[in-house]
Amino acid sequence: MRVLVIGDAMIDMYLWGKVERISPEAPIPIVSVTKHESRLGGAANVVLNIQALGATPILFSVIGNDENGRKFRRFLEKRNLSCEGIFSDPKRKTTVKSRIISNGQHVARVDEETTAYIGQEMENELISAIKETINKSKTDAIAFVDYDKGVITPNLFRSVNKMALKKGIPTAVDPKKRNFGLYKDVTLFKPNFGEFVGGTGLAVKKGDIRTLKEVANTFKRKLNFKFIFITLSELGVFISNGVNEQHYPAVIRDIADVSGAGDTVVSVASLAAAADLSPKIMAMMSNLAGGLVCEKVGVVPINKEQLMNEMQTQKI
């Protein structure tokens, strides 16, 4: 199974250490760093998850023509992942999110990034490369992973989605705020609760599943999704195809870190959509996978064996 992942790729950097005193310069903790670690993040973490689940991902993204961009390419190559869809833009920074962690807790995060939309020339190159890949060999699904960093422009989405619709390729979207209302006619639209409320501007209280069902189905009809799938963190997930709708509670877990859970969920859901699985199985598998990665600190992928074992444990 081959999946194209289009969106904002980045490096997740971790500085691990201990807080032993407060700074004399300001009332802030001093972290004595004991370990540095860098990982693929954003759309690249979706690629890692899809690869770990046994499918073949191809990433399309734009990074900076800088040292972090070169590091990003080396990370892909080290994982035996293709760089054919990676474009370097000297006008942009490679996004790096640096997380400072002490005693298993996040102390701070520092972001280095460019958030403006990519320029028209780069957009045209990216669209051309995506279309060439789709025409060259079979594509089973396309995932749009939007972190509001500017890779997914309105024109890029519409051009690629038009081709996907024509060829019958399932599409999944993990949205953020800027393009929230852009994603018409996709197979699967997967915001988290905060993104859904912020993106629609609708007043829904967390835990009010009845109201959520009403507004989610209204929004689904407006943008013509096949499925709307909303993750609710500790409350589980909600999925609807407009006829059948269901809320699945979360499995109780020891949560260490929620970073990357959305990437894992959209990875599993994209593969489920490509395999034409039922909404129930799609939601329950994705719910389990998202919960599993929350047990680990940092952004980490889940593999097929872990997920299958958990499905057996939960009798799915």
Image (cartoon, rainbow, N blue to C red):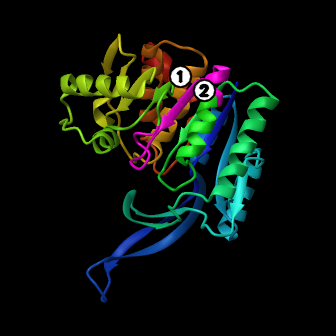
User: SS class of the residue under badge 1?
Assistant: helix
Residue matched to label 2: 305
Q: Residue furthest right?
A: 136
Residue at point 44%, 45% (across, down): 179
On whether residue 286 falls in the magenta region, the answer is no
Amino acid, disc 1: Asn
With respect to residue 185, does 51 lie above or below?
below
Residue 279 appears in view: yes
With respect to residue 45, does 234 lie above or below?
above
Q: Residue furthest bottom?
A: 25
Q: Nearer the viewer, residue 203 or 51?
A: 203
Residue matched to label 1: 309
User: SS class of the residue under badge 2?
Assistant: helix
Tags 2 and 1 in contact by the CB under 8 Å rule? yes
Magenta span: 163-182
Q: Nearer the viewer, residue 106 or 96?
A: 96
